[in-house]
Amino acid sequence: MIDSANLLIAGCGELGARIGSILSAGGMRVWGLRRRSERLHGSIEPIAADLSQPDTLADLPARFDLVVYTAAAERFDDPAYRRAYVDGMRHLLDALERQQQRPEKLLFTSSSSVYAQSDGVWVNEESPTLPTHFAGLRLLEAEDLLVRRFAGAIVLRLAGIYGPTRTRLIRQLESGEARCIERPPVYTNRIHLDDAARLAVHLLGMTGSGGVYLGVDHEPAEQCRVLRWLAKQLGVVPPQVVDEAAAGERGLRSNKRCSNRKVLATGFRFQFPTYREGYGAIIREMRGEHPS
């Protein structure tokens, strides 16, 4: 990867900004495309545009050597997911093609929700993707669109991202709203925000063609185990255990164990290999403690 390359981050939210900051520090020129471009700062040059509105993409600057697509849906519903991932991906590819831009690589941050397995089995990059829920369906549709139109595309299927600004589980425990299902075991998968950004940068820097990668830490963990460990660290009441009926459809939709063997085989090493290191660092930061 050329240090002086030009990089476009399409849908430059929190994850995209972290990727851009890492690469700009290494000498790249980075543009961040988003509707509210005034929210970008530092070394990322803003582009005010809307991926769901192709007219706003009519005049992209420079020649992009690399493109990262990190758009996120505004809401958790099918129309929002279609706009963010399927329509947005199509509009960006159309714009690059019209402007005769031929990036070396295009990386799409997809999601492990493209897997439909819900019985706690292990999945990897070769496992069947037969989602039945709109979230997985639209992300898989965007993946297929990208792979068909861009040779050597990189698809990074990220598990649940957490970090200093993504502390939903901590908030639920502190408010007493946390719930979990103990029997049958419900497995959850995650990756720290910093590791997600570092992994994207790592994959962009690899030689050779693209491919599909699962972005997940070393330890798929039972939902109750994670919450009980967190409750102990926080000094709050453990989560209430509920049955399957009380959990509802969304609580049971995802139950699989994602493998990161392919990512590890590329030489990538995690800063936060499990939830214990990641959430431990977040809690220390919340308390104003210095890193150990």
Image: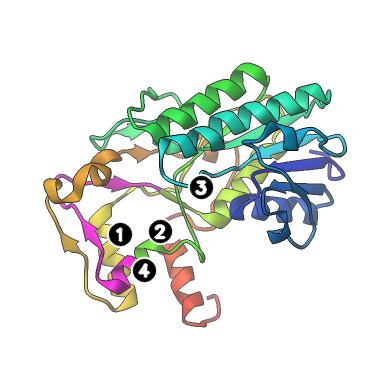
Residue 141 is situated, as x and y percent measured from the top left of the image, at: 50, 24
Q: Are marks 3 and 1 in contact (CB under 8 Å)?
A: no
* Of pointers 4 and 3, the one earlier in the residue sequence: 3
Q: CA distance from mark 4 to mark 3?
A: 21 Å
Q: In the drawing, does residue 21 fall left or right of residue 28? A: left
Q: Are marks 1 and 2 in contact (CB under 8 Å)?
A: yes
Label 3 crowding class (10 Å Cα cut-off): few <14, some 14-19, many 20+? few
- Viewer-nearest of discs 4 and 2: 4
The type of residue carrying mark 2 is Tyr
Q: In the drawing, does residue 23 fall left or right of residue 222? A: right
- Viewer-nearest of discs 2 and 3: 3
- Residue 131 to residue 33: above or below: above
* Of pointers 3 and 1, the one earlier in the residue sequence: 3
The residue segment tinted magenta is 172-189
- Viewer-nearest of discs 3 and 1: 3
How is the structure coloured here?
Answer: rainbow
Disc 1 marks which residue? 226
